[in-house]
Amino acid sequence: MIETKLGDFEEVILLIVGILGEQAYALNIADEFEAQTKRAVSIGAVHSTLTRLAEKGFLESKMGEASAERGGRRKRIYEITAAGQRALENSRDFKVSLWNQFPAFASKLDFTF
Amino acid sequence: MAPPKLAQKLLCWFLKDDLAEEVLGDLEEKYIKTTTAHSKVKATINYWYQVINYLRPFALKKYRSNSNYINMQQHNFKISIRNFQRNKSAFLINVIGLTTGLASALFIYLWVNHELSVNAFHANSENIHHALINHEEDHTLRTTQDTPGLLAEALQNEISEVVRATEDTDPLWFGESFALSSGNEFMKGLGKFSGAQFFEILSYPLVEGNAQKVLADKKSIAISESMAIRLFGKVTGAVGETVTWRLLHFEQEAIISAVFEDVPGNSTDQFDFVLPYQVFKEMNGAGINWLNFNAYTVVELAPGTDVEQLNQRLKPFIKEKSAKSNVSPMLYPYTDWYLKGNFENGVAVGGRIQYVQLLSIVAVFLLLIAVINFVNLTTARSSKRMKEIGVKKSLGAVRSSLIAQFITEAILLSAVSMVLATLLVKVLSPQFSHIIGKHLYLELTPTLLLPLFCTTVFIGILAGSYPALYLSKLKPIHIFKNKIKTGFAEILTRKGLVVFQFIISIVMITSVIIISDQIQFINNKNLGYNRSGVIMLPLEGETVKKMDTFFDQVAQVPGVMGASASSHAFVKKSGFTTGVSWPGKDQNVVTNFGFARVYDDMFETLEIEMIEGRVFSKEHANEKSKIIFNEEAIDVMGLENPIGTQVIFWGEEREIVGIVKNFHFSSLHDAVQPTAIIYDDEFMSHAFIKINASDMSETLSRLDSFYRDFNPEYTFNYEFMDGKFKQQYQAENQVASISVYFAAIAIIISCLGLFGLASFNAEVRRKEIGIRKVLGASSAKIISLLTGEYMKTVALALIIAIPLSYYTGQYLLADYAYAVKINIWYFLLAAGLSLVITYLTIGLQTLKSASINPVDCLKNE
C-alpha cells in the first residue's frame, strides 16, 4: 500500500517544486525552502522527501542539462504529476472546509478562489 | 575551488551509484555558492554536513551477499529463532537449565581458580620448597611443617643445591598478643619472625626498602602498608622510624627497614609485620636445638634440581646432627602445601585439592544434566520437524547442511544461556562470596572471554550433535509416507539419559545429606569437655604478670562460674612432645604425646572428667613435679597401677597424680592421642572463663569493666570457644553449604527436563487419553498411567544411585577420625525426596491432561 496522505513537510516541498518549475532540482528546492520558511534544511533531507513523493506518484523526474559549476554533471529536474496536483488541491480543500467550520472566522473570511 | 576530497570519497562509498551524478552535482554547486557568498571554510564544513545528511536509507547502497555459505547461515539463524518461538516451553526449559548449569559452573570455576592461585604468585614459585619433617613413630611416618630452628642455616651452608633458605614462624603462634606502637597506643597485628632472606625467596612486593637488607639487622622490622598507615597515617617516610613491639612480656624497639604491600588474599601466610628471626632465637635461648620444632623452613633450590634425589640424600641430615633425633627432613613444593597438605606415612595424599576436584566434577555434571535436557527435548519433538526435513531433503539439501542447521540451533541456545549465566554470576557473586567465605568476582578479561566462547561452542556441539545426526538421517520418502516410527533404540537412549541425570542428582543429594549430618555431628559431639558458655581471651600485659591475682579476682565477678589458663587452645592444633619416658618403655619406639600446661581449676572450668586420682590444685605443694595423663596415654604406656608411678617428662621426674577420661584435644580430623598435662603458672597463652548462660551479656559487660581496670593497656578481646571450634571446620562447612545449592540445582534441572518430556508426551497422547476417558477410565487411572512410566525411570535411577552414593559417602567421610555411620536413612531420605519432587513435577502436568474433556480432543475426527 502506498501512503497517499501528504505530510506537512511533503506538502511544502511539493508546492515549492511547482513554484520553481523548470529549475526544480534538489539543491534549488532546499535553498528555496530555506528562503521561504527561514528554516535550515539539508539537501539530503529534501532529496529523501523528493524520492518518497516520487514513489507515491506525486512527482516525476528527468535528468536536466549539465553546467560548469556542477563539474559538468547533470541535475535531476522534478515536476508535479496530475496525482500530485490533486493531492495538493484535496489538502487545501480539506483545510478550507475546516476553516469554514470554525465559527470565529467562518463569517469574516472568504476562501473562495 | 574543489570540494573536500575525503568527504567526496565517503559519499561515493555509501551512496547508490545511480544517485551519484545528481547528488555530487548538487553538493558541488552548493559548495561553490557558499564559497562565493561566505568563505571556503564555511563551505567545507557545510559540504561535510550535507554528506553526513545523505546517510539516509533511500540513498544507501543495498548490500546483499551472494555467498551461499552466508545465505545458509542466515537461513539457519532465522529457522532457529522461529523454532524457538514455536516451542516456547521447550526453549524456556533449555535456557533455564543451561543458564543455571553454566552459572553454577562459572561459580565453581571462580572458586577453583582462586584455590589454585593460592601461594602461586611468588615469582620463583617452582623452585621454592617447604622443608617438612617426617617423624618416625610406631613404624609409620608423621609429617609436620614444624622444623628445628637450626635447619635453614644448616641446609644453606651444607647443601649446594640450596640457593637460599630462611627460617619462618606462623603469626598464629603468637595469637593476638603481638602489638606495635609508634610512641602512643599499641596496635595489635599479625606479627611473625622470619629469617634474613625471607623477602628474597618469597616475592612480597616492597613499597619501600631493599629486599636483601630488610631483616639483616637484628633491630629491624618490616611492616605492611596498612600497618604503616595505622601507625603513622602515611606510607612514605615510614622507613627509618622507630617503633616498639610487644609480645607477651617482651618489649623492644626496632627500626623500620621496609614497607611491603599488604599481603594478598590468596596467600595462606597473612601477616602485618615481620621481625628478624634472630630475635626469636635469642628469646628462646637453648630452646632452639635439633630436638625442638619451633620454626618453619623455606628454601629456594637452584633451577633444575632433582628434588626426589635431594630428598633421599637429606634423610639422615638431622640424625647426623643429633643422635637422639628420629626425624628426617623432606622438601615439598611451597605452592602444593595449601592444596595437597595431607600426608600419610610421608607421602602426600591430597588435602583441599579433594574439594577442588569434587566441585569441578560437580560443575561438569551440572552442565551434562542441562545438555541432556536439550538432547531429550529435541529428539522427542523431532516428529514435529520431520516435514521440514523432508522438504529440505527433497529440494536437495545434503545431510551436512542439515547437521549444520541443528548445531547452529544448539549453539545459538547455548550462547543465549551463556550471556544470561554471565549476567547471573555478576549479580549473584556477592552472595556466593559470602557463602564460600572468599571474595570472588567475575571479570570479563580477554583471557576469560576466549574460554567462555569455546565453552559455548563446545556445549552447543555437545548438545546439538545427537539430535543433528538423528534427524538428518531420516529418509524423505519415509517421512512423507508417515512411515517413521519412534525406534526402540531412540527411546532407550532418551530413558538412559534421564536415568543418568537422576543418578547424578540422587548421588549429589545423598552426599549433601551425609556431609550436613557429619557437620551436625561434629558440632554436637561430646568432646569430653564442655565448651558451651566458655570464652577465651589471650593472656597479655597485667594478666601475665599478676596471673594469680587475676584469676582470684575474675572468679569473684558475678556470673563467672570458673576460670583458668592453659598453654593450649583446645580448639586449635596442639603442641606435641616425644620427651616422655616411663618404667618399661621400649626405647626403640618413639611415642608422640599431645601436651598442655594448665593452671588451677582447668579441669573444673571445662568439666573434664577424672577417672582416677585428683586434679591439680594450689592446695598441694609441689604441683610442678606432678603430671596427669589421659586414658589413651595410660593404655599406650601399658602401666598397671599408674597413680603414683614416676615418669620422666622433659628430663625431670614427675609423679602421676590423676587420669582423665579421653577428651578431644584438637580437631575431630585427628583421633584422640595420648596426652600429658602438667601444672604451670608460666607460658600460658589463653585464659578460659566459664560464664553463666542465664545472664551472659551482663556478665560479659561486668568482665569488660573489670578487665579494663585490671589491664588498662589492653582491650577485653574475647572469643567464644564454641565459635572457635566451628572455625576449625570452616573449609568443609563452606564447601558443604555451597554444595546444598548445587544439589538442588541438579535435581531442579533434571526435573525441568522430565517436565518437558512429560508435557510433550501428554500432548501427543491427547487423543488416547480422550478415548480412554470415553470408555470409562477415571482421572486417577490416567494419572497413574502417565506418571508410572517416569516414576519407573526414576526408580531405576535410584537403584543404581544408592550403591554409588554409598561409595561417595565413604570417600567424603574418610578424612574424619570420627565420622557418622552411613546408614539406611540417608538413602531413604534421598530416595523419598527425589521421588516426591519428580511426582510433583510430572503430577501437576498430568493432572491437567487427565482432566481434559474428551469432547475437546476428539471432536476433530
Image: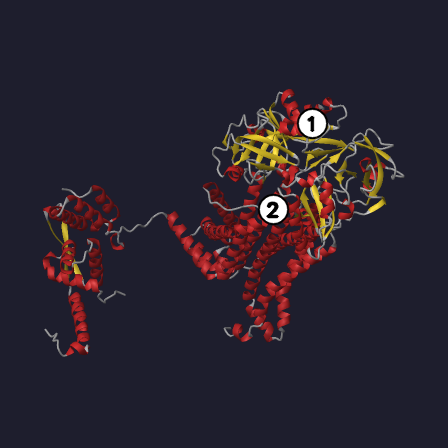
- Asked which quadrant contains residue A26, the reply is bottom left
- Mark 2 → mark 1, Cα distance in angstroms: 47 Å
Frontmost residue, B89 versus B661: B661
The answer to whether residue B65 is above or below residue A34 is above
Q: Which residue is identified by label 2?
A: B359
Mark earlier in primary sequence (2, 1): 1
Residue density around tag 1, few if under 14, some if 14–19, many if 20 or more, within 10 Å: few
For the question of whether residue B830 can be seen, the reply is yes
Frontmost residue, B754 versus B337: B337
Relative to B719, is A41 on the left or the right?
left
The answer to whether residue A62 is above or below residue A1 is above
Residue B81 % position (x, y): 43, 57
Q: Chain of mark 2?
A: B
Amino acid type, mark 1: Gly
Q: Quadrant of the N terminus of chain B?
A: top left
The answer to whether residue B169 is above or below residue B91 is above
- Asked which quadrant contains residue A3, the reply is bottom left
Q: Chain of mark 1?
A: B
Residue B248 % position (x, y): 66, 36
Relative to B658, is B442 on the left or the right?
left
Name the front one of labels 2 and 1: 1
